[in-house]
């Protein structure tokens, strides 16, 4: 990406004594008690924060969490658990500032060099979602350097990802944002063949455009979850009462035909793991794809399918992974995703994986070291793969171009 990079500003000694505002993606999963269940995104953003502190900046960090109602604070929407976790990881206090748009102070004073605060959920600010110009101006006035290190929100043109970057004195890309954009660009520009994409999820409708875009680029397109069920319908197979979108069967068939015309394929499961109810303790039954009963729910791919897909991944040159192939949160229906995860880790291919469920699967099966690049973004990951321009990256590149003019 052609943006100013925060690491270059640090190397040029332009950060010491500056007020640095870092937009990160701390939108992490929590259980009912508010405990963080996967801190991958938090850990991925720490290098940027630590580098800014080490360089002598006063550092303000903010993130979104969930989809709160603007202007209405609730404990469930608060970054308080995040602040506590970041404090634990860094081994230092991280105060959470609730009302910060009109000024950031601690105990009535301005931040000092080397000091760090977390600013409350940015999506609570009225005007955030609509990229309000007045809000963007106020945010920009808080800092000397704006750093976007939130690739997961780069497809959103919002005040904290786009508007502030228009007006900040310096706007640049953090190491996580830059690294993820560079990795995806590498995949798009000159992938080593065969290029195999794995796209899982509940609905074809949410990922139809990426499936259509990938069908023109990849040598193999593995679909999983509810998406696979729709493709099974398109292939004339029974799916019982499984989650699927019958109205999109023609679209799925068009993707399959597009792949076939190029000598590529969308492998259809030859066996599946079914249950009668959607529950963690539901008895699991493995059966041929042709034998799915009318009252069956397909919750995972079967062992024969998993083995065949793993074999294909062994010979891949590049692998793109977004989404599990089954309900991996339930132990009995996790084995298909586990097999895919280990096959990717064992492959000599350059692999890039992204999306919240994908990150959770990588963590669950302990394959972090075997994945070439783990991308924290979900929607941004897919949109960039599709070839779309991401607003948050586009504005950083515009600012870099203006700076060099």
Image (cartoon, rainbow, N blue to C red):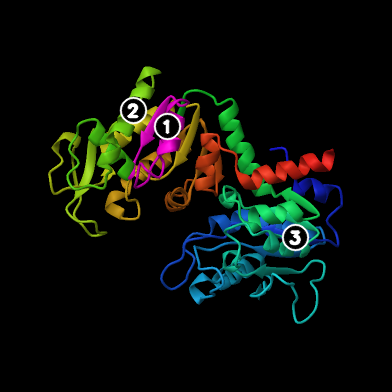
Mark 2 surroundings within 10 Å by alpha-carbon count, few (fewer than 14), some (14 through 19), many (20 or more) = some
**From the image, which quarter does the N terminus lie in?**
top right
Which residue is under mark 1? 212
Residue 228 x/y as whole percent: 31, 39
Compare residues 342 and 24 and report the one nearer the observer. Answer: 24
Decide which of tag 2 and tag 3 comes sooner along the chain.
Answer: 3
Residue at x-position 48% and y-position 36%: 320
**Label 1 vs label 2: CA separation?**
9 Å
Residue stretch rendered in magenta on the structure: 198-225
Circles 1 and 2: CB atoms closer than 8 Å? yes
The residue where tag 3 is placed is 140
Q: CA distance from mark 2 to mark 3?
A: 47 Å
Q: Which residue is mark 2?
A: 254
Q: Quick one: 345 or 22, which is closer to the camera? A: 22
What secondary structure is marked by label 3? helix
- Residue 347: where, in percent of width, then height? 47, 32
Which element type, helix, strand or loop, lies under badge 1?
helix
* Quadrant in the picture for the C terminus: top right
Q: In the image, 285: left or right of 91?
A: left
143 or 180, nearer to the observer: 143
Sort mark 3 into few (<14), some (14-19) or many (20+) by Cα contacts within 10 Å: many
Q: Is residue 223 magenta?
A: yes
- Residue depicted at x 77% and y 42%: 400
Please report whichever mark, 1 or 3, sits nearer to the chain's N-terminal start. 3
């Amino acid at each position: 990406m052609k943006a100013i990079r925060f690491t270059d500003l640090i190397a040029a000694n332009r950060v010491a004594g500056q007020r640095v505002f870092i937009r990160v993606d701390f939108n992490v999963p929590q259980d009912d008690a508010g405990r963080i269940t996967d801190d991958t995104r938090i850990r991925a953003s720490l290098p940027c924060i630590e580098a800014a502190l080490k360089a002598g900046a006063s550092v303000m960090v903010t993130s979104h969490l969930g989809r709160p109602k603007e202007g209405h604070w609730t404990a469930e929407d608060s970054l308080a658990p995040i602040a506590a976790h970041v404090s634990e990881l860094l081994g230092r206090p991280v105060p959470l500032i609730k009302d910060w748009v009109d000024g950031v102070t601690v105990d009535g004073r301005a931040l000092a060099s080397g000091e760090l605060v977390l600013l409350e959920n940015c999506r609570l600010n009225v005007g955030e979602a609509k990229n309000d110009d007045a809000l963007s101006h106020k945010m920009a006035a808080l800092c000397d350097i704006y750093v976007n290190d939130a690739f997961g929100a780069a497809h959103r043109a919002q005040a904290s990802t786009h508007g502030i970057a228009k007006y900040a004195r310096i706007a640049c890309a953090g190491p996580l944002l830059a690294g993820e954009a560079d990795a995806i660009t590498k995949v798009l520009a000159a992938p080593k063949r065969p290029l195999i994409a794995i796209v899982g999820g509940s609905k074809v409708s949410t990922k139809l455009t990426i499936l259509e875009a990938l069908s023109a680029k990849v040598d193999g397109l593995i679909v999983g979850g509810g998406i696979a069920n729709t493709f099974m319908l398109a292939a004339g197979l029974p799916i019982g009462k499984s989650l699927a979108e019958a109205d999109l069967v023609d679209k799925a068939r068009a993707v399959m035909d597009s792949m076939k015309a190029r000598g590529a394929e969308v492998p259809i499961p030859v066996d599946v793991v079914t249950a009668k109810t959607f529950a963690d303790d539901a008895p699991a039954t493995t059966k041929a794809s042709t034998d799915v009963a009318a009252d069956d729910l397909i919750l995972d791919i079967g062992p024969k399918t998993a083995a065949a897909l793993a074999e294909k991944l062994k010979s891949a040159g590049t692998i793109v992974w977004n989404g599990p192939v089954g309900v991996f949160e339930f132990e009995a229906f996790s084995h298909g995703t586990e097999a895919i995860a280990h096959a990717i880790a064992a492959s000599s291919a350059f692999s890039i994986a992204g999306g919240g469920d994908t990150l959770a699967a990588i963590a669950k099966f302990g394959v972090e070291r075997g994945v070439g690049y783990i991308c924290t973004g979900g929607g941004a990951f897919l949109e960039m793969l599709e070839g779309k321009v991401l607003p948050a990256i586009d504005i950083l590149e515009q600012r870099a171009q203006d700076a060099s003019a």
